[in-house]
């Protein structure tokens, strides 16, 4: 049965979640019991939704998506984005930061709440992603369809893995020394974040600078693994790591301050986290909410960004933000 756009439901981790039982912003519940869907904004607002049922979901038959006909606008036009990149390079030269992820948010007006179930099907066909998730929670005002390729946090018992992405090009030949340096820098940041809640000496990097192919582009991806310290659970893990290092910068606190100066609108769910938690078995998987649509206040929103270092070419960074969303815009418009 196809869920209504006005019902509370979610699709994540190969399961469909139905029968909403509880809504809370307390991350402590993720270490109690039940099947949970988790959505956190970049700014830190958290929604945890417990569902009665999680059943296997293979895509099934989906109604056709009704394309968005309204024009897309951007919170930063090309000139403004290029100017923001130049500002970051100036701050790097001053020693304030080493890397900053600069983002912009695209928006298109819609005629009422879109059919996220159909949108999930359109994304699955045009841009399949390893951490895809769709969350429709009218009870909480949350409407998200994500085609994320990036692992934020995977937990299995006391073991935690993060998979930061840094470095994007159309093909592997297009990856540069700047991409490599950026990835290594963010891996170090993620190691530091996990180290705040990990057993001393347990943080390791089993994979560094792997090239992953995704629809229309390639990424450099690394893996950082750690063992949670006694007493640390989901609440402590999210407090130590969110928002993800790959979408903030280094040092994280300085990068966040500069992001607040340069970006004219909140990112919302974009660059936050979305995924599932099986509290009964201490398992879960949250994605970094990139390649992610959010519906809010009559508009469909889609963020895009790029990591800026001293070696960044401002025009090329703009082009990277265009590349990252071109297939997604094509899928829905």
Image (cartoon, rainbow, N blue to C red):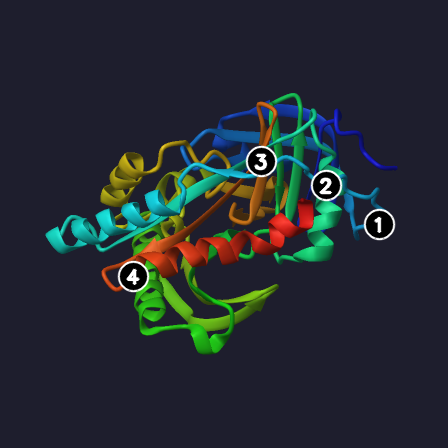
Mark 1–mark 2 distance (CA, rounded to whole Å): 20 Å
Circles 1 and 3: CB distance less than 8 Å? no
Q: Which class describes the residues within 10 Å of circle 3: few (<14), some (14-19), or many (20+)?
A: many
Mark 2–mark 3 distance (CA, rounded to whole Å): 15 Å
Q: Which class describes the residues within 10 Å of circle 4: few (<14), some (14-19), or many (20+)?
A: some
Q: Which residue is mark 2?
A: 67
Q: Residue at horizontal 25%, vertical 38%?
A: 257
Q: Which residue is mark 1?
A: 60
Mark 4–mark 2 distance (CA, rounded to whole Å): 35 Å
Q: Which residue is mark 4?
A: 312
Q: In the rendered structure, which disc, 4 or 1, sits on the residue that comes first in sequence?
A: 1
Q: In the rendered structure, which disc, 2 or 3, sits on the residue that comes first in sequence?
A: 2
Q: Is residue 293 above or below residue 219?
A: above
Q: Is residue 284 left or right of residue 89?
A: right
Q: In the rendered structure, which disc, 1 or 3, sits on the residue that comes first in sequence?
A: 1
Q: Nearer the viewer, mark 4 or mark 1?
A: 4
Q: In the rendered structure, which disc, 3 or 4, sits on the residue that comes first in sequence?
A: 3
């Amino acid at each position: 049965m196809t869920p209504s756009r006005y019902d509370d439901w979610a699709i994540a981790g190969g399961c469909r979640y139905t029968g909403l039982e509880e809504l809370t912003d307390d991350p402590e519940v993720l270490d109690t019991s039940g099947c949970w869907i988790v959505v956190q904004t970049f700014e830190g607002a958290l929604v945890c939704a417990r569902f009665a049922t999680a059943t296997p979901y293979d895509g099934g038959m989906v109604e056709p998506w009704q394309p968005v006909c309204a024009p897309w606008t951007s919170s930063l036009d090309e000139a403004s984005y290029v100017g923001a990149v130049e500002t970051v390079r100036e701050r790097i030269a001053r020693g304030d930061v080493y890397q900053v992820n600069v983002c912009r948010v695209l928006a298109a007006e819609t005629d009422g709440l879109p059919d996220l179930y159909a949108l999930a099907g359109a994304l699955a066909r045009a841009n399949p992603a390893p951490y895809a998730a769709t969350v429709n929670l009218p009870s909480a005002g949350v409407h998200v369809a994500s085609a994320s390729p990036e692992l934020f946090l995977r937990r299995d018992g006391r073991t935690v893995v993060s998979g930061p992405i840094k470095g994007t090009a159309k093909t592997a030949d297009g990856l540069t020394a700047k991409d490599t340096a950026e990835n290594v820098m963010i891996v170090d940041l993620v190691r530091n974040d996990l180290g705040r809640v990990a057993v001393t000496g347990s943080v390791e990097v089993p994979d560094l600078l792997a090239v992953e192919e995704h629809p229309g582009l390639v990424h450099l991806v690394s893996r950082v693994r750690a063992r949670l310290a006694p007493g640390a659970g989901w609440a402590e893990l999210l407090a130590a790591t969110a928002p993800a290092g790959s979408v903030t910068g280094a040092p994280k606190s300085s990068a966040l301050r500069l992001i607040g100066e340069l970006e004219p609108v909140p990112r919302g769910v974009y660059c936050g986290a979305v995924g599932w938690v099986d509290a009964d078995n201490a398992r879960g998987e949250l994605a970094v909410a990139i390649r992610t649509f959010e519906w809010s206040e009559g508009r469909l929103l889609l963020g895009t960004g790029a990591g800026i270092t001293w070696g960044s070419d401002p025009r090329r960074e703009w082009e990277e933000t265009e590349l990252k969303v071109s297939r997604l815009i094509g899928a829905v418009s």
